[in-house]
Amino acid sequence: MFENIFDDVQRMNKRQFLYQVLSFGMIVSSALMIWKGLMVVTGSESPIVVVLSGSMEPAFHRGDLLFLTNYKEEPIRVGEIVVFKVEGRDIPIVHRVLKLHEKETGAVKFLTKGDNNSVDDRGLYAPGQLWLTKKDVVGRARGFLPYVGMVTIYMNEYPKFKYAVLACLGMYVLVHRE
C-alpha cells in the first residue's frame, strides 16, 4: 500500500507536486481563516471546545463538542454553563454557575461547580481566588454535538495515533490529483 503511494509521488513532476503542496497550504489557511471568523462572530477566543472530563455529567459527557459565545453585553446568570480559564492552567474548564455576587459598583463575581462534583470549584481557582469574574470566561455553552470530540481526546492521549492520522491526511493531499 505504502509502495503505491510513494510510486505515485515519484511519478509526479515538480509542477504537480508543487500544486499539491499549495493546495494543502490553502486548506490549512482556509481552516485558520474560518477559525478566526468564528472567533469574531462569537466573541470567544475559543468558539469550539471539547469536554475533557465527566464533571458535567449528565448534562455533558466526556468528548462532547461545545459551541460557545461570549458577548460582553450579556450578563452571567445562575445556572448558565460557562467555560473559563484559571490563571496558571492552560486547559479551560466547563462548569455551571452556582452563585452570583453583584456589587453596588456593578462588578459581578460568580462561583462555579461541575454538575457531577460534590463541592464548588474554589479548589480549582488560582491560589487566593474565591470568585471568577467576566475576564476569566472564555465563553458560554450554546449548543453541543455528543461525543464528536472523542477524536481529539484520542489524539492527545495517544500521540502515535495523532501522527498516523496526520501522516495519512498529508499523504492523501499530496497524492490525490483533483
Image (cartoon, rainbow, N blue to C red):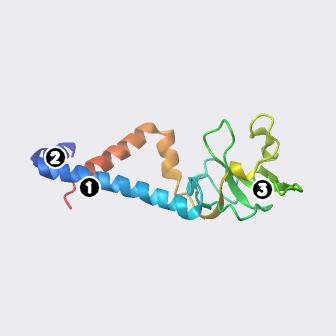
Query: Mark 1–mark 3 contact, CB under 8 Å?
Result: no
Answer with left or right where residue 81 lies relative to residue 167.
right
Q: Is 4 placed above or below 30 here?
A: above
Residue 142 placement: quadrant: bottom right
Residue 177 placement: quadrant: bottom left
Q: CA distance from mark 1 to mark 2?
A: 15 Å
Q: CA distance from mark 1 to mark 3?
A: 45 Å
Look at mark 2 in the image and give the residue it sits on: 9
Residue 100 position within the rendered picture, expressed as x and y whole percent measured from the top left: 84, 56
Query: Which SS class for mark 1?
Result: helix
Look at mark 3 in the image and give the residue it sits on: 97
Q: CA distance from mark 2 to mark 3?
A: 54 Å
Look at mark 1 in the image and give the residue it sits on: 23
Query: Which SS class for mark 3?
Result: strand
Crowdedness near tag 3: few (<14), some (14–19) or many (≥20) residues, C-alpha within 10 Å: many
Crowdedness near tag 2: few (<14), some (14–19) or many (≥20) residues, C-alpha within 10 Å: some
Q: Residue furthest front?
A: 105
Query: Mark 2–mark 3 contact, CB under 8 Å?
Result: no
Q: Which of the two discs, 1 and 2, labels the residue nearer the N terminus?
A: 2
Asked whether residue 57 is in view, the answer is no
The residue nearer to you, when weighing 44 against 49, is 44
Residue 93 position within the rendered picture, expressed as x and y whole percent measured from the top left: 67, 48
Crowdedness near tag 1: few (<14), some (14–19) or many (≥20) residues, C-alpha within 10 Å: some
Query: Which SS class for mark 2?
Result: helix
Asked whether residue 81 is in view, the answer is yes
Amino acid on which disc 1 is placed: Ser
**Residue at 21%, 43% in the rendered image:** 2
Amino acid on which disc 2 is placed: Val
The residue nearer to you, when weighing 161 against 176, is 176
Amino acid on which disc 3 is placed: Val
Q: Is 37 placed above or below 114 here?
A: below
